[in-house]
Amino acid sequence: MSDNTRDQINSLTKKTFSDALIYMPSKILPAIVGVIFIKILTEVFSNEEYGLYQIIFASFGLLKTLNRGWLANSAIRFYSPYKNNTTTYFSSLCFSFVIGTVLVGIMFYIANIFFLKQNYGDDFFNLMNIAILAMFTNVFFEVFIVIYRADLKPKVYSIYWIYFAIGKPIVGLFFILFFGLSVKGIVLGMLIVPLILDIILYFKLHLNVLIKISNISVDLIKKFLQYGLPFVFTMLSFWILSFSDRYIIEIFCGRSAVGLYTVGFVISERILNFLYMILMLAAYPLIINNWEKNGKHSTQQLITEYTRYFFLLCIPILVILIMLPEHILLLLSNKKFIQGVSVIPLLSAAFFMKGLNMLVIKGFELTQKSYKIALIALLSGCLNIGLNIIIIPKLGFIGAGYSALITYSFHFLLSILMVKSDMAWKPNYFSIIKILLSGVIMGLLLLILKENISNIILIYLFVIPSGLIAFFTVVYLFKEINDKEIRNIFSFIRKIGSKF
C-alpha cells in the first residue's frame, strides 16, 4: 500500500469514527429503550401474547420489506449524482414511494381479508389492518431520513432517528399500561409516532416546494427500479432468514414456543445489530464517496480496515453472549422465558456472520451488481426454510437456531466466493487471528470465573468487566491496537461530547 493510499485510508477511518460517535446516540438510546421494552413486555405478556406480538411484528416487517429496502437504497445511492437537481430527485422519489406503498398496501389488505382473517381470527385481522396503515408512515420516514445520511449529516439523522426509534415503543407502552390495549397498543405506537415525524420531515426537507409532478423523471425512476428492485428479493430473503421461523415454530410447536424463541432471538439480534450498524451507518456513505473519487483499490483497502474494526467491536460481545447467555437473558427479560436461553449462543454466532457479510457484499453494491446480492440471499432463504421444516419438528424451537447459524454461514461463504470477480473481500487475516485468539482467552477467563462465582450481581459487576479488560489487554499486547489509536479514540470522544 502506497503512502498516499495509507494517508487516504487513515483520513477516512478517522472521519468514520467521528461520524460513528455522532450516530451512536441514535443506536444507544433506542437500544436502551428496546432492552427496557423487552423487560416490560416479558413481565406483562404471557408466552403466548409475546408470541402473537412477534408474529404481528414479523408480518409488519414483511410489509416494510417490499417497500423500504429497495427505495431507501436507491435514495442514498443516487442522491450524490442528483444533488444539484433536487426537484427532479425528490419528485421522482416521492412518486415511487406513493406507487410502491399503495400497491403493497392493497395486496396485503386483500390477503388479510381472504386468508389471514379466516386462519387467525378477527383480532389478528384488525391488528394487521392497523399494521398496513403503519407501513405507509414508517416507510416514508425510513426512505426520506436517509437523505441526511447521504448528505453526510449524521447529527441530524441521529436526532430524528432517536425520536422515531424511541417514540414508537414509548407510545406503545403508554397504550398498554394505561389503556390495557396489549398488542394493539404497540401497533398504534408504530402508526402514530412515524406519522408525526413524517409531517415534520416533509417540511424540513422542503418537499412541499421541491415535489412537482412536472419534474418527475421517468429515467430516474427506471434507475431506482433497476438498482433497487433486486434489493426487494434481497430484503425478502433476509426477512425469510429473520422472521419465517416464527411461523414454522408456531405450526409445529405452538405460539408459546414462538415467545420463548423470539426472546433469545431479539436479545442476540439487538445487541450485535447495535454494534455493527453504528459502524456501517458512518462507513457506507464514506465508502461510496471513496469509490467515486479514488477507485477500486483504495476502497478495497478501506473495507479491509473496517473489517478489522468490526472484529474489535463485535468479538468481545459475541464471547459474552456465548459464555453467559443465561445471565444476559435474566438481565434483559423475565425468568419465565429462561428456556429461550438455549438459542442465544447459536443466534449470536449467526448474527455475527450476518454483520460481517455486510462488509463482504460491498463489492456488489459499489459495482451495482445488486442482483447477485439478491441471488445469494434468495438461495440462503430457501435453505433456511428447508432446514427449519426438517429440524424444528425434531428439535423444537432450538432447531431454528441451528438453522440460522448454518444458513448465515452458507450466505457468508457464498458471498466471498461470488464477490471475487467484482471486488474481492481481502481482510487482514493476521489481525483477525490475533483478535480471535484474544476472544478465546477472554472466553476461558469468563468460564473460569463463572464456575467459581455464582452471585449474579458479581457476574454483571465483576466477571463481565474482567472479561472485557482481558480482551483489550491481550489485543493491546498483540499490538492490534496502538497508543495512537487509543489517543485518537479518546480525542474523538471528547470532541463529540463537546458537540452535544
Image (tube, rainbow, N blue to C red):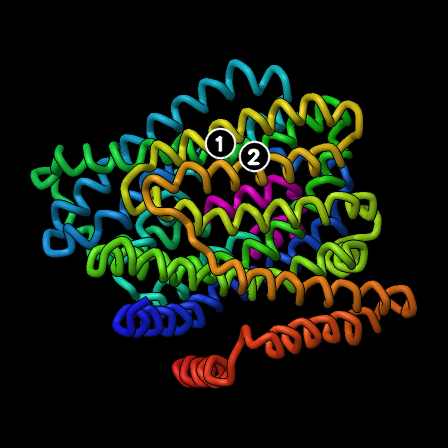
Question: In the drawing, does residue 338 fall left or right of residue 232?
Answer: right
Instruction: Report x, y in % for residue 309.
Output: 49, 65
Question: In the drawing, does residue 309 fall left or right of residue 321?
Answer: left
> Does residue 174 belong to the magenta stretch?
yes
Residue at 58% across / 40% down in the picture?
409
State the extent of the magenta-drawn residues as a range.
170-192
For mark 2, give the secondary structure.
Answer: helix
The mark found on residue 237 in the picture is 1
Identify which amino acid the numbered label 1 is placed on.
Answer: Ser
Vertical order, 438 against 223 (above or below): below
Image quarter of residue 70: top left
| Residue assigned mark 2 | 241
Vertical order, 343 against 480 (above or below): above
Residue at 12% across / 45% down in the picture?
88
For mark 1, give the secondary structure.
Answer: helix
Which part of the image, by quadrant, shows the C terminus? bottom left
Answer yes or no: do the residues labelled 1 and 2 have beta carbons within 8 Å? Answer: yes
Image quarter of residue 419: top left
Q: Nearer the viewer, residue 379 or 205?
A: 379
Image quarter of residue 473: bottom right
Q: Nearer the viewer, residue 292 or 104?
A: 292
Identify which amino acid the numbered label 2 is placed on.
Answer: Leu
